[in-house]
Image (cartoon, rainbow, N blue to C red):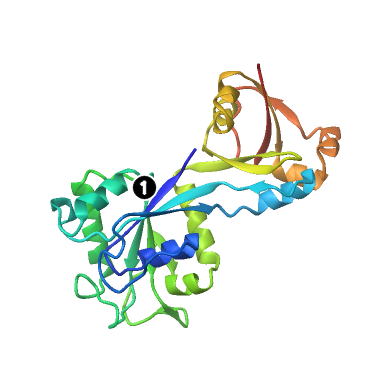
Amino acid sequence: MSLKAGIVGLPNVGKSTLFAALTKKKVEIANYPFVTIDPNVGVVEVPDERLAKLAEVVKTKKIIPAVVEFVDIAGLVKGAHEGKGLGNKFLAHIREVDLIIEVVRTFEDPNIIHVEGSVDPERDKTIIKEELAHANLSEKPILTVYNGIKQNGQFRNIEIPTYRDGIWIDLTKEYEKPGEGLSYLISATYELLGLISFFTAGPKEARAWTIPKGSTAKRAGRAIHSDFEEKFIRAVVIFWKDLVESESYQVARAKGLLRTEGKDYIVQDGDVIEFRHGV
């Protein structure tokens, strides 16, 4: 399944910086509103160290991770639902995504203008919330990224209450040298929608497949091909760590770690599955 996350926020808060850091694509970043008119789109790998370990066991060099599609949507402004700025066009782009990443500015910088004239994270969040609500988009899952500059563990120049509903990231620093912040953001985006990964692993490739948490083995087959769901017979399953520790399917089988599951088996995050289906 394809997962699409839209990056939104007021102008000059760091949206394009986040997108560039995530995707390493060259996008225009400038100090004025509406620099991003048409949405940039980039596909980003979901960090997963399990794949590399599985690849070693099955002796393949080809690794295909799960991905998230990030969409850099131009800045919202107060009154966007009434057509202010380029509002209607931007809101249309947001309707196409599964999840919203809301970038909120927490740093003061006289050289970077703020469309509202001052830095106020709570006000900015309220503006975005109201615009999404007016456009009937307030029920989409939202992950907040607080963009700020840390000095001695504190954010500079502005008093910020303790937030527990988002992720703090110094986006300028992450853009210059990606760190754990981006990896955590990508994984959080994946998890917020209730998604998990199962794997297929063989001589051709080790690959992660995205499915909703709670999916049955039969439903999981759809991620690979519709025939795997429609003509499902059974699934041969092993947990990824058991396979890695066994160092081969042969040893894992001798240990009794490979098991056969039916169509109603609930797939677990990290399962390695071989599907058996009819012709």
Q: Is residue 140 above or below residue 179?
A: above
The answer to which of 154 and 218 lies nearer the viewer is: 218
The one nearer the camera, 138 or 92, is 92
Quarter residue 26 falls in:
bottom left
Q: Residues within 10 Å of mark 1 (few under 14, many from 20)?
A: some
Direction from residue 90 to residue 229 in the image, left or right: right
Residue 265's spot in the image, x, y percent? 61, 27
Residue farthest to the top, as pictured: 279
Q: Amino acid at mark 1?
A: Pro
Residue 173, horizontal then vertical, whole percent: 47, 74
Q: Is residue 170 visible?
A: no
Q: Nearer the viewer, residue 67 or 49?
A: 67
Q: Is 181 left or right of 8, judged from the image as shown?
A: right
- Residue sitting at x 70%, y 52%: 52
Figure quadrant of the C terminus: top right
Single out the residue that lies furthest toward the left.
Answer: 82
Can residue 82 be seen here? The reply is yes
Question: Where does residue 124 sit, x and y in percent of width and height?
Answer: 25, 64
Q: How many marks?
A: 1
Residue 140 location in percent, x, y?
33, 45
Q: Is residue 127 left or right of residue 192?
A: left
Q: Which residue is mark 1?
A: 141
Against 272, residue 42 (above or below) is below
Instruction: Name the element at disc 1.
Output: loop
- Residue at position x 44%, y 44% from top? 193
Q: Residue at x 85, y 38 (%)?
A: 251
